[in-house]
Image (tube, grey):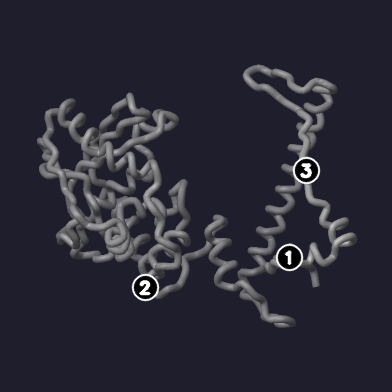
Amino acid sequence: MSYNVFANTQSMPYEDWLDCRRQGIGGSDAAVVCGVSRYKSPVELWMEKTGQLPTQEAGEAAYWGNQLEALVRAEFTKRTGIEVEHRMELLRSGEYPFMQANLDGICLHPDFGPCIFEAKTASAFKVSEWENDIPDEYLLQVQHYMAVTGYQGTYIAALIGGNTFRWKFIERDDELIATMIQLEERFWQHVQNKTPPVLDGSDSAARFLAEQFPNSAPNSRIELPNRAEQLIQQYDTACQQIRDLTEQKQQAENQLKQMLGKHEAGTAGEHIVTWKNVVQERLDSKTLKAEHPALYKKYANKTSYRRFAIKSL
């Protein structure tokens, strides 16, 4: 697969780099598009690509990951003897121009030839994710990079918790890449057409709907598509499950409180259960409104939102 250098990122301002990222699907976007990201939903990514979300500064994790990249690269070379050529370029696929890759480096494999190098840093709490394999989002990221470049393998190295180093070699998976390209192509059509992907149950999807349709037209009614009946059944089933689970949770809480009695805390195996007194001060808005209506009116905030409900006709 052929590719070209879309932009040199060596001295590129952060805002310009973000703008370039919005013009295609990058490696870190692949897990989101494929629906396996733990941190972002497809509709949130779609909002980013269509410029509907404000520009955000890089967080602490991203900042330190960038700062420690050279250290991870040097340690990999020290442990393996494999030299890594550092790259600061944004690549774009020739066959699928919406696919982009921002590589950490290029190195040579004795059997596979030119390969990708990817550096990562991770929390100590995630060390188990690196024992036998690599996290799914990183697997999809490097497969995306191999789709763009045509390379047959990737070395990925990670500094975990600041004191544990892991590195692995990942071979190209053409079957996975073919599926990924289909999903990314479909997603990019949504970006180009300005139509959101199928909405999921994420907070970002709910936020998108609230922003797109903030007000309802009074006394208006439409006939919903046939699929609405299936969704209503799904909604009712989920509500019943929530009620059942809430009751189970409350039952366990009540019985634990009974066991504690007048005691503030109790232990059970490796757990500690507490039932403490908490003192709070709350504004009595009802009394304030009755006794000082002018003051209440001055500081009361009027909010508007759309309440969702399903009722039988």
Tell me what residue is drawn at x 78 percent, y 43 percent: 281
* Residue at x-position 40% and y-position 60%: 55
In the image, residue 84 sits, relative to residue 224, either above or below, namely above
Q: In the rendered view of the protein, which quadrant contains the N terminus?
A: bottom left
Expressed as whole percent of the image width and height from the top left, the position of residue 83 reads 11, 35
Q: Distance of mark 1 from mark 2, alpha carbons?
A: 33 Å
Give the label, 3 or 2, closer to the camera: 3
- Secondary element type, mark 2: helix
The answer to whether residue 7 is above or below residue 137 is: below
Say the numbered circle drawn on residue 281.
3
Q: Are marks 1 and 2 in contact (CB under 8 Å)?
A: no
| Inter-mark Cα distance, 3 to 1 | 33 Å
Q: Secondary structure at mark 1?
A: loop
Q: Are marks 3 and 2 in contact (CB under 8 Å)?
A: no
Q: Which residue is mark 1?
A: 309
Q: Quadrant of residue 90?
A: bottom left
- Left or right of 209 in this view: 38: left
Question: Sequence-wise, which precedes: disc 3 or disc 1?
Answer: 3
Instruction: Please identify the quadrant where the C terminus is shown.
Output: bottom right
For residue 10, which numbered disc appears in the image?
Answer: none
Q: Earlier in the sequence, mark 1 or mark 2?
A: 2
Amino acid type indicated by mark 1: Ala
Residue position for label 2? 192
- Left or right: where does residue 159 sit relative to residue 110? right
Please state which of residues 162 and 156 is positioned toward the viewer in this rendering.
162
Provide residue 196's location: percent of width, then percent of height: 47, 68
- Residue type, numbered disc 3: Glu
